[in-house]
Amino acid sequence: MTATATLTAPADSGRHTKRTERGASDEGGCTGVRIERNAEGQLIAHKDGKAVPVRVVRCFPWTAPGKFVSLRDEQDHEIALVREAAELHGASREAFEMALAEAGFVFEIERIDSATEVYEVRHWKVRTRQGERRFQTKLDEWPRELPGGGFLVRDVSGDLYCVPDPEQLDPQSRRILWALAE
């Protein structure tokens, strides 16, 4: 089946939007972008005739991790916003979902053994559901409180660590967390 697309411009806007008829096989879906993995495994977005290496960045809310995902280039400019995976079709959707799964891994902290400052970096030693981990954060990278009451920590390499319920931590872990969260 071929895609039938029309460009529409609202009367009060100079912007054009692409609408694809139902049942069309447009690889880009509503986002106007086609996504693939190159030979090196890098995620590539094709938009407006250009191929751009991108990474997926989840937008809030954290309660809907598969929705509202920004595709960003190396300079952190948004190339496209994917409202949900269903907007994409075929190989684009498969590549997107794989990249989302890779980017979506979050370590769940069960215990904090230490968080010490050395030079301009904080060194963490924690126990997660996935095992013991050591990571570093910048001194100005504080645990962020989540809407559901937990905390999120991003390390210097971009990995995410979550404390879903601080009250479930042992007393020492809570003392360390509260000292850094305030």
Image (tube, rainbow, N blue to C red):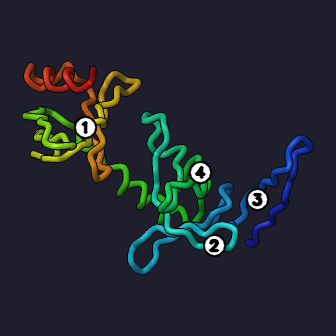
Q: In the image, residue 64 lies at what x, y percent?
A: 47, 38
Residue at the bottom extreme, as displayed: 39
Q: Are marks 1 and 4 in contact (CB under 8 Å)?
A: no
Q: Amino acid at mark 1?
A: Leu
At a point 69% along the width and 68% down the height, the residue shown is 48
On screen, 35 above or below 60? below
Q: Which mark is residue 50?
A: 2
Badge 1 density bin: few <14, some 14–19, many ≥20, Cα 10 Å: some
Instruction: Say whether residue 156 is left or right of residue 33.
Output: left
Q: Nearer the viewer, mark 3 or mark 2?
A: 2
Q: Earlier in the sequence, mark 1 or mark 2?
A: 2
Q: Which numbered dot is residue 49? A: none
CA–CA distance between discs 3 and 2?
A: 20 Å
Query: Which numbered circle lies on residue 139?
Result: 1
**Residue identifier under label 3:** 20
Q: Residue at x 39, y 77 (%)?
A: 40
In whole angstroms, how far apart are the C-alphas of marks 1 and 2?
A: 38 Å
Instruction: Please say if the residues under marks 1 and 2 sit with CB atoms less than 8 Å apart.
Output: no
Q: Residue at x 18, y 40 (%)?
A: 122
User: In the image, is 138 to the left or to the right of 117?
Assistant: right
Circle 1 SS class: loop
On screen, 55 above or below 42?
Answer: above
User: Please, what secondary structure does the residue beneath circle 3 have?
Assistant: strand
- The quadrant in which residue 160 appears is top left
Q: Viewed as shown, does residue 112 lie left or right of 9?
A: left
